[in-house]
Image (cartoon, rainbow, N blue to C red):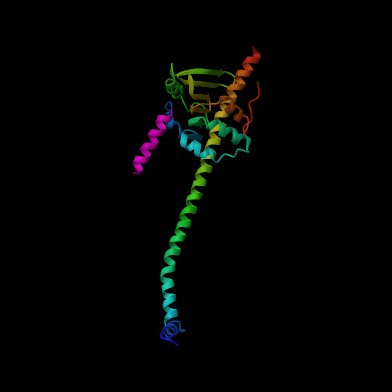
């Protein structure tokens, strides 16, 4: 019975997630990692515990109301060269047209960082977002499934204890 | 006094309980009380434990959501900052 429940849960995760994030081999090398696979029911359940009086939590509640899933793998490394371009490429290769289109691609020589935002469209409607962010010592891959309010999400990045990036 | 009155008087007359009535009653109480008491306690513990577990899970889900929002938000915020600085340079 437990195996059946686990299989169903795994199937649910794979169905909701829009591309595979095969980066498990980096776990041993990372000094810190975040691995989140939040399915729709978990998001909605957690949403009931968000305080609408708290500005950040109220924004988060609004954002997750349109989401069907949220999947993140984030690795930080103590030294450079712990992940390869092939690791990034195997994710990028899954984001193909006509479903996926790259909305933003930033390559900063100064910070040696790459930032990519991909949008998935279905029937002329955005149904998901992928974010790939790399710098020599960190790698982040995000898949937001569903109706995503990017502006509200970016605004949250400037709160919650994380300083908003200043214009250079 | 007719026969009915006589019958009633006899029926309602004060009767002393049997000498072992008290001990028998106590024994029965001891036998029956712990059963329903244990069942009630179990129900309370299960219901309370379930509520605590559910609350703990909800807090865990909330923390995960907020962590996800912060991480994603910070990356999008970086994108915005880069786009703005490029726009300003042009």
> How many callouts does the rendering have?
0
Q: Residue at x 37, y 39 (%)?
A: A6
Q: How far across and how far down the image is residue A121, in percent?
A: 47, 20
Q: Residue at x 50, y 50 (%)?
A: B51
Q: Residue at x 46, y 60 (%)?
A: B40
Q: How far across and how far down the image is residue A82, in percent?
A: 48, 28
Hey, which residue is sitting farthest front in the picture? B2
Q: How far across and how far down the image is residue A101, in percent?
A: 48, 17
Q: Residue at x 59, y 27 (%)?
A: A152
The answer, for residue A39, to whether it is visible in the render is no
Please name whichever residue, A140 or B73, is drawn nearer the observer in this view of the structure.
B73
Give the extent of the magenta segment.
A1-17
The answer, for residue B69, to whether it is visible in the render is yes
Position of residue B35 in the picture relative to residue B83 (left or right): left
Residue A9 covered by magenta stretch: yes
Q: Main secondary structure of the magenta part?
A: helix
Residue B78 covered by magenta stretch: no
Q: How far across and how far down the image is residue B3, in percent?
A: 41, 85
């Amino acid at each position: 019975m437990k195996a059946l429940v686990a299989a169903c849960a795994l199937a649910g995760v794979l169905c909701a997630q829009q591309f595979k994030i095969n980066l498990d081999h980096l776990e041993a090398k990372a000094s810190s990692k975040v691995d989140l696979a939040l399915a729709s029911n978990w998001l909605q359940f957690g949403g009931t515990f968000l305080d609408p009086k708290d500005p950040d939590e109220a924004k988060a509640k609004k954002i997750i109301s349109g989401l069907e899933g949220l999947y993140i793998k984030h690795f930080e490394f103590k030294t450079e060269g712990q992940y390869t371009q092939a690791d990034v490429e195997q994710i990028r290769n899954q984001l193909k047209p006509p479903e996926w289109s790259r909305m933003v691609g930033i390559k900063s020589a100064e910070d040696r960082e790459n930032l990519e935002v991909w949008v998935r469209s279905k029937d002329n409607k955005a149904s998901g977002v992928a974010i790939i962010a790399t710098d020599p010592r960190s790698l982040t891959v995000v898949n937001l499934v569903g109706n995503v309010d990017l502006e509200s999400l970016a605004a949250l990045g400037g709160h919650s204890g994380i300083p908003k990036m200043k214009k250079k | 006094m007719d026969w009915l009155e006589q019958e009633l008087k006899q029926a309602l007359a004060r009767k002393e309980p049997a000498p072992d009535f008290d001990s028998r009653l106590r024994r029965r109480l001891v036998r029956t009380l712990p059963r329903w008491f244990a069942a009630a306690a179990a129900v309370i513990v299960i219901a309370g434990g379930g509520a605590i577990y559910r609350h703990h899970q909800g807090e865990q889900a909330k923390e995960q959501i907020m962590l996800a929002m912060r991480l994603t938000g910070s990356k999008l915020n970086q994108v915005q900052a880069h786009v703005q600085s490029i726009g300003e340079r042009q």
